[in-house]
Image: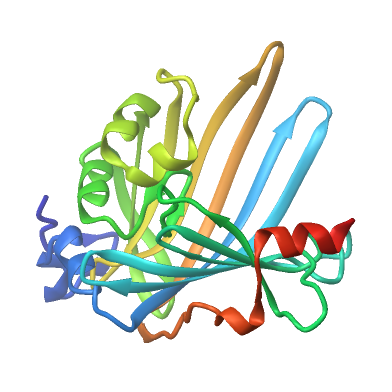
Amino acid sequence: MTIASVTLSGLVTTANAQTDPADALRRQLVEGRGVTMSEVFASRESGGRTSYRKKTQAEFGKAGVTGTDVRDVATPDTPDDPPRFLIFKGRTYCQGWICPAPEGKTWVLLSEDEKTRPFLQVGGIDLADPGTLKAILATTDVKRPGGTYDNTRTTVYQGTLTFSRLFKTSAAFRAQHDGMSAKTELSWRLWLGEDQLVRRVRASWPERFGKRLISHVVDARLTGWGAKTDIAVPSADETAGPDEWRDSRS
């Protein structure tokens, strides 16, 4: 989908706005480069509200994300040693209170699974997959000026699509939302900068557990597209294996 240069309420986009967002994303898929994303995830039901924050650094390769460094953000209500995860193809490493490493080790090899993949995703929307981005934008209902994020003026695109449609489009969704109702609708907003790169994402969807209805909302900001990254696989010397970690907890 080609986004033409437009003027909206005094907002004049640059010539870069003629770039297709999917093509703009493809140009970011360069080895040793990446982006940082900060998220706030909230869930509400009749009994109250829960929320948490996390920060993700993603490193790219030609085919997409090659590694992610995901850190929970500490709050007054959480432990002092928040979890941190390094995710690569087939492997997940962990630090923090939920996976304490034995003495002399820094990391825990939390899992080895050939299905594991690092994703840059919000609500199952894979933000590092040009095909998913194009499919999401094809469901746009509303387009308007969106304010300034990451030092660039943005245009916000807004729409909805079913989980069934997203399941067909997004590998990140298939990996992390298996078993959800196909008819559930995901409401989304994407803020695209003048360079057509995503600067903010908001996604919301309902989930039922019997008579319980839970509303989920995630709001994410992306900064530093194209920044140098170095998410390295921990060495064997600093990593505790699954059995060694389990033994340390007994």
Residue 181 rendering spot, x and y as whole percentages: 47, 20
Quarter of the figure with residue 222: bottom left
- Residue name at image x 68 percent, y 39 percent: 43
- Residue name at image x 67 percent, y 27 percent: 214
Residue 104 rendering spot, x and y as whole percentages: 77, 84
Q: Nearer the viewer, residue 78 or 44?
A: 78
Whether residue 78 appears in this view of the structure is no
- Residue name at image x 39 percent, y 37 percent: 174
Position of 91 with respect to 108 (left or right) is left
Vertical side of 32 occupied by 11: above or below: above
Vertical side of 250 occupied by 212: above or below: above
Position of the C terminus by quadrant: bottom right
Vertical side of 106 occupied by 88: above or below: above
Residue 76 rendering spot, x and y as whole percentages: 88, 65
Quarter of the figure with residue 110: bottom right
Quarter of the figure with residue 155: bottom left
Q: Nearer the viewer, residue 31 or 194?
A: 31
Position of 16 with respect to 68 (left or right) is left
Residue farthest toward the top in the current orientation of the protein: 211
Position of 44 with respect to 89 (left or right) is right
Whether residue 193 appears in this view of the structure is yes
Residue farthest toward the bottom in the current orientation of the protein: 228
Total numbered circles: 0
Residue 229 rendering spot, x and y as whole percentages: 41, 84
Position of 68 with respect to 163 (left or right) is right
